[in-house]
Image: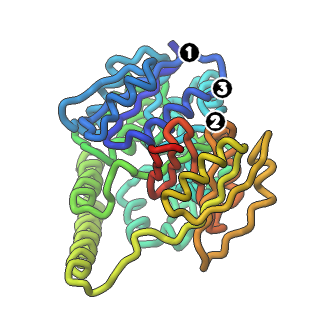
């Protein structure tokens, strides 16, 4: 077995479905297995995977055991020479897996690989390349110097934003959303530290890969990452878990450091967490008292691009869901036809959601399209005919009663 893909899932049934579909469409002749570890989802994820993806090895936990422990459960039953930790809210271009494996085979010093993660509006996620969060690097990040001087190799080390995006580069920290590792290096460095319930475990693991003598690499291969569909980043629990992970990493790797370095970082972490908690509390109180009203969703106008059968189904979906929509009938390579014909959305007007059919458009072409429309008020939507459903970064729109 060449590759074991481990996905930890929690209440993201349809994002997981899309992720698994993109893996199915991957190119290359390498043999792989998929292991899904479900952390006690309540949305029928387990039944859905069993029904639609019988090839998947499924671990159905009775409790939410956390991201690190669940990944270790998957690693324990994996047979691959390489291990890929993959988030369920991701989507892979068809060439990603084969290209990563080819790179690993030709670079024996490489222990881990990360890739270019895109958001649904085409922006490159800064988390795609990161440096070790030493006390000084963390201070530059939390003080704002990292953002102020993004080309500085001193101040911008946290995101390594001085590196080019379009060529392979050695990096230090690989995102846990997509982290491919050589199994022998992972065994030597040690599996995920289960003291981290969620967040921070990828930083700790990447650091240990480097300390074991391996190299970590970034490859300019595109994937889509919805960035935390399974977490609520406006919740008190998120703030607690996230900043607790930062403290665990600091204690584990820099507990012996000079107090003049560690104490300011601890103060900064506690201060930042306190400010975020206060902001969440203030927003909740203000909303409950009616001090201000918030719109839950930005206005969106949909553009459905596809063949006639897909468009007929989408017209019904749009009608019954009250969507503002336009329709473009094309055939062949839909992205090549659609790109020049799509009007640029105004930043002050409704956001344009361009919806492609997953049955007729390659995922790699979708990613290429949305990256070429970065910062044009356009987001990517994907239509899945088997569920009569649109997946966007903000919501899932499903119409079950087809005519």
Between circles 2 and 1, the one closer to the viewer is 2
Q: CA distance from mark 3 to mark 1?
A: 11 Å
Q: Is residue 305 above or below residue 110?
A: below
Instruction: Please name whichever residue, 269 or 263, is drawn nearer the observer in this view of the structure.
Output: 269
User: Does residue 256 appear in the picture of this structure?
Assistant: no
Q: Secondary structure at mark 1?
A: loop
**Colour mapping used in the image:** rainbow
* Direction from residue 330 to residue 101 in the image, left or right: left
Q: Are marks 3 and 1 in contact (CB under 8 Å)?
A: no
Measured as percent of width and height from the top left, residue 302 is found at 61, 61
In the picture of the structure, the residue carrying the numbered disc 1 is 31
Measured as percent of width and height from the top left, residue 115 is found at 57, 42
Q: Secondary structure at mark 2?
A: loop
* Direction from residue 36 to residue 305 in the image, left or right: right
Q: Secondary structure at mark 3?
A: loop
Q: Is residue 14 above or below residue 263?
A: above
* Direction from residue 74 to residue 126 in the image, left or right: right
In the picture of the structure, the residue carrying the numbered disc 2 is 359
**Which residue is at 58% across, 68% downward?**
351
Q: Is residue 129 above or below residue 341?
A: above
For marks 3 and 2 on the same chain, the one whose residue lies earlier in the sequence: 3
Q: Picture quarter containing residue 160?
A: bottom right
Q: CA distance from mark 3 to mark 2?
A: 16 Å
Between circles 3 and 2, the one closer to the viewer is 2
Point out which mark residue 202 bears: none
For marks 2 and 1 on the same chain, the one whose residue lies earlier in the sequence: 1
**Which residue is at 60% across, 46% downward?**
313
Instruction: Please name whichever residue, 272 or 208, is drawn nearer the observer in this view of the structure.
Output: 272
Q: Residues within 10 Å of mark 1 (few under 14, many from 20)?
A: few
Measured as percent of width and height from the top left, residue 307 is found at 72, 43
In the picture of the structure, the residue carrying the numbered disc 3 is 27
**Which residue is at 58% across, 47% downward?**
382
């Amino acid at each position: 077995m060449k590759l074991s893909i481990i996905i930890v899932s929690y209440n993201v049934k349809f994002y997981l479905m899309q992720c698994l579909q993109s893996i199915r469409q991957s190119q290359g002749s390498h043999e792989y297995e998929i292991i899904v570890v479900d952390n006690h989802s309540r949305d029928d994820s387990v039944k859905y995977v069993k029904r639609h993806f019988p090839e998947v090895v499924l671990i159905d936990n009775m409790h939410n055991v956390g991201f690190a422990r669940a990944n270790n459960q998957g690693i324990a039953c994996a047979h691959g020479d390489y291990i890929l930790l993959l988030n369920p809210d991701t989507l892979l271009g068809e060439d990603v897996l084969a290209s990563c494996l080819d790179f690993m085979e030709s670079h024996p010093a490489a222990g881990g690989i990360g890739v270019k993660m895109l958001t649904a509006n085409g922006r490159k996620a800064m988390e795609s390349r990161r440096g070790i969060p030493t006390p000084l690097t963390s201070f530059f990040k939390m003080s704002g110097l990292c953002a102020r001087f993004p080309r500085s190799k001193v101040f911008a080390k946290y995101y390594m934003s001085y590196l080019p995006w379009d060529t392979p580069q050695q990096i230090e920290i690989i995102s846990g959303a997509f982290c491919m590792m050589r199994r022998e290096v992972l065994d030597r460095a040690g599996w995920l530290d289960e003291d981290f319930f969620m967040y921070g475990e990828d930083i700790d693991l990447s650091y240990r890969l480097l300390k074991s003598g391996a190299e970590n690499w970034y490859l300019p291969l595109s994937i889509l990452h919805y960035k935390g569909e399974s977490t609520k980043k406006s919740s008190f629990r998120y703030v607690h878990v996230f900043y607790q992970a930062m403290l665990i990493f600091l204690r584990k790797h820099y507990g012996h450091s000079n107090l003049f370095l560690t104490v300011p970082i601890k103060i900064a972490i506690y201060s930042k967490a306190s400010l975020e908690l206060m902001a969440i509390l203030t927003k909740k109180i203000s909303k409950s008292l009616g001090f201000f009203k918030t719109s839950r969703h930005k206005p969106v106008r949909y553009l459905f691009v596809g063949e006639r059968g897909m468009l007929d189904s989408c017209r019904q979906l749009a009608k019954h869901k009250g969507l503002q929509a336009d329709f473009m009938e094309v055939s062949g390579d839909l992205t090549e036809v659609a790109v020049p014909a799509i009007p640029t959305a105004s930043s002050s007007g409704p956001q344009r959601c361009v919806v492609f059919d997953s049955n007729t458009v390659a995922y790699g072409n979708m990613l290429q399209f949305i990256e070429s429309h970065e910062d044009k008020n356009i987001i990517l939507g994907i239509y899945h005919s088997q569920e009569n459903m649109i997946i966007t970064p903000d919501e899932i729109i499903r119409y079950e009663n087809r005519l």
